[in-house]
């Protein structure tokens, strides 16, 4: 890398404002709908949001129903069972 490029990168900095005079456009390249109209969904949005909602629900309820594999809980139950046997 030539020293001139390296020096230019050091002087300007990553978070500097830059030299762009005009804003590049709207978010995601979309133009806002006219006033009074709502935005029309793309064909992929309904399956995507539905799939994400189902995945979150399956994970939530699936993780709540998992077996307890904590070694401390097992040891406590085993100790209580052995103490009951000795009485």
Image (spheres, rainbow, N blue to C red):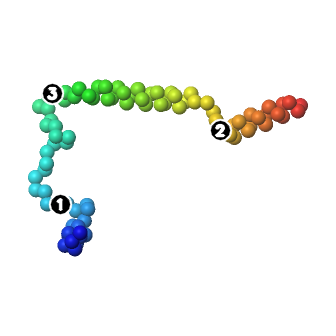
Numbered disc 3: secondary structure: loop
Q: Residues within 10 Å of mark 2 (few under 14, many from 20)?
A: few
Residue carrying label 3: 37
Residue 59 appears at what percent x and percent y?
47, 31
Residue 19 appears at what percent x and percent y?
14, 60
Residue at the far right: name it. 87
Residue 43 appears at what percent x and percent y?
23, 26
Q: Residues within 10 Å of mark 3 (few under 14, many from 20)?
A: few
Residue 13 can be seen in this image: yes
Q: How many marks?
A: 3
Residue carrying label 1: 18
Numbered disc 2: secondary structure: loop
Residue 31 appears at what percent x and percent y?
13, 37
Name the image quarter holding residue 69. Answer: top right
Residue 53 higher or lower than 6, as above or below: above
Q: Nearer the viewer, residue 59 or 26?
A: 59
Name the image quarter holding residue 32. Answer: top left
Tag 2 or tag 3, which sits nearer the N-term? 3
Distance from disc 3 to disc 2, alpha carbons, whole Å, reads: 54 Å
Answer with left or right where residue 73 lies relative to residue 51.
Answer: right
Q: Nearer the viewer, residue 47 or 4?
A: 4
Q: Residue drawn at (23%, 69%), measured in percent from left and top?
A: 1
Residue carrying label 2: 70
Residue 11 can be seen in this image: no
Q: Residue drawn at (46%, 27%), measured in percent from left and top?
A: 58
Q: Residue drawn at (27%, 29%), measured in percent from left and top?
A: 45
Q: Which mark is residue 27?
A: none
Q: Residue drawn at (68%, 40%), measured in percent from left and top?
A: 71
Numbered disc 1: secondary structure: loop
């Amino acid at each position: 890398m030539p020293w001139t490029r390296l020096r230019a990168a050091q002087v300007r900095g990553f978070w500097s404002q830059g030299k762009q005079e005009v804003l590049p456009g709207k978010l995601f390249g979309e133009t806002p709908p006219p006033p009074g109209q709502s935005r029309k969904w793309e064909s992929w949005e309904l399956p995507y949001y539905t799939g994400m909602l189902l995945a979150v629900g399956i994970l939530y309820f699936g993780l709540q129903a998992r077996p307890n594999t904590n070694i401390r809980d097992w040891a406590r139950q085993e100790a209580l069972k052995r103490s009951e046997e000795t009485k």
